[in-house]
């Protein structure tokens, strides 16, 4: 299945209606009648091909082999769907970086294009979550949710694998071969409805085939997801300004921003500050954010935080009490247990708090591929060792 940005039809015009609509009846798609129900930007990368040695047509998606370029497609009638179940099968014909992304709740507008993605990787045989925020993937934020496919579910090149994607009340569940037990349940993407579709690996990779889709309404409760083991309970509250297309500070000097423009940014269910939801990649290259947090010292004799710690996929410039303290981040993945895990300790900057209000300001560089978030905390390691 070859797809190069198959954006739902409203990608090219204003969305006529924001009304959520249910699927009225079962839908079957075997691609024997072409791509009339699918939207694509590149027919060279999203096409119908015949399965070798058989009289059977399949959807083929082929990566564009350019860094950051995407091959995807969405199903035109689905742009206002909320709850559904889609089954089908997929096959990786070639060895290499095989990838199939299952798109759900695809929404586009004047300011940005966001959509949920759960994807299967052939080499490595695993499933990851990677919502795309204005086109930029975010798998660096969700490595703790990665699930390996082993045993009967192990991905094998040249073999057809069955899949099911259930989406209900914002929770996406992906099943591979075993239709009774989901490989991954994911409920941290924010769109309430939108189109469904598929994508090949962004950038370089191998082609993938999809066939025999069956889509039907889904009227059930979402699964219960326990994120306790990968949740960081932060002791910081953040505010944000931006996104900006250019820096609002000069060199290492702290930015001077209007007080009235600060607004709160809340963490996700794991305690992660998701900056990708605000920065713009495809819709204007506005990728710079400024965040701030404050803490009060009213008793100089009491223990004080002596470090600020981060686990960040993006580069962060850090100012404390108006002074530049350094640049941290750009880790391959973010980790919720960065305060205690010696294998993924993140980064720390020392602090000397003063009596009264103490302010930390961050400059977030949001243009890193597949990133868009961080964990942060104040800590006093000397107190914790007692």
Image (cartoon, helix red, strand yellow):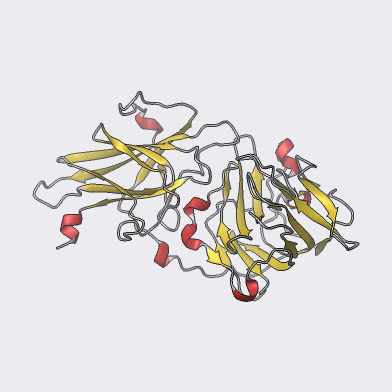
Quick one: 168 or 6, which is closer to the camera?
Answer: 6
For the point 73% across and 36% down, the residue is 12
Q: Answer with the quarter of the image where residue 185 lies.
A: bottom right
Position of residue 155 measured from the top left corner of the image (x, y, whole percent): 65, 66
345 or 224, which lies in front? Answer: 345
Position of the C terminus, as image quadrant, is: bottom left
Residue at the far left: name it. Answer: 301
Reply above or below: 357 against 122.
above
Residue 195 in view, yes or no: no
The answer to whether residue 184 shows anywhere in this view is yes
Above/below status of 365 relative to 299:
above
Q: Horizontal and vertical percent for residue 335?
A: 40, 56
Q: Is residue 175 left or right of residue 145?
A: right
From this view, report whether residue 14 is shown above or below residue 81.
above
Q: Identify the image quadrant of residue 176.
A: bottom right
Q: Is residue 133 left or right of residue 75?
A: left
């Amino acid at each position: 299945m070859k797809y190069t940005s198959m954006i739902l039809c409203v990608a090219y015009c204003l969305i006529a209606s924001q009304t959520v609509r249910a699927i009225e009846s079962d839908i079957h798609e075997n691609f024997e009648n072409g791509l009339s129900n699918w939207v694509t930007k590149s027919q060279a990368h999203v096409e119908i091909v015949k399965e070798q040695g058989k009289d059977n047509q399949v959807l083929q998606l082929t990566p564009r082999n350019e860094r950051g370029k995407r091959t995807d497609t969405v199903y035109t009638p689905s742009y206002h769907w909320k709850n559904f179940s889609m089954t089908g099968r997929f096959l990786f014909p070639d060895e290499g970086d095989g990838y199939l992304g299952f798109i759900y709740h695809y929404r586009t507008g004047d300011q940005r294009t966001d959509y949920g993605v759960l994807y299967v990787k052939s080499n490595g045989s695993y499933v990851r979550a990677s919502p795309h925020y204005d086109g930029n993937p975010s798998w660096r934020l969700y490595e703790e949710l990665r699930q390996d496919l082993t045993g009967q579910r192990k991905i094998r090149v040249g073999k057809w694998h069955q899949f099911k994607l259930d989406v209900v009340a914002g929770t996406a569940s992906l099943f591979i071969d075993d239709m009774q037990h989901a490989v991954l349940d994911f409920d941290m993407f924010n769109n309430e409805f939108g189109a469904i579709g598929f994508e090949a690996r962004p950038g370089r990779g191998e082609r993938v085939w999809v066939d025999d889709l069956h889509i039907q309404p889904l009227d059930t409760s979402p699964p219960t997801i326990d994120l306790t083991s990968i949740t960081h309970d932060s002791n910081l509250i953040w505010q944000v300004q931006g996104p900006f297309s250019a820096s609002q500070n000069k060199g290492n000097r702290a930015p001077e921003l209007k007080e009235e423009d600060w607004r709160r940014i809340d963490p996700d269910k794991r305690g992660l500050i998701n900056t990708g939801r605000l920065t713009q990649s495809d819709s204007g290259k506005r990728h710079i954010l400024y965040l701030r947090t404050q803490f009060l010292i009213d008793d100089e004799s009491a223990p004080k935080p002596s470090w600020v710690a981060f686990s960040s996929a993006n580069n962060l410039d850090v100012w404390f009490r108006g002074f530049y303290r350094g640049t941290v981040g750009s880790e391959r993945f973010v980790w919720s247990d960065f305060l205690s895990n010696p294998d993924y300790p993140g980064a720390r900057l020392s602090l000397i708090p003063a009596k009264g209000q103490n302010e930390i300001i961050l400059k977030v560089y949001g243009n890193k591929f597949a990133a868009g978030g961080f964990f942060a905390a104040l800590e006093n390691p000397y107190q914790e060792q007692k």
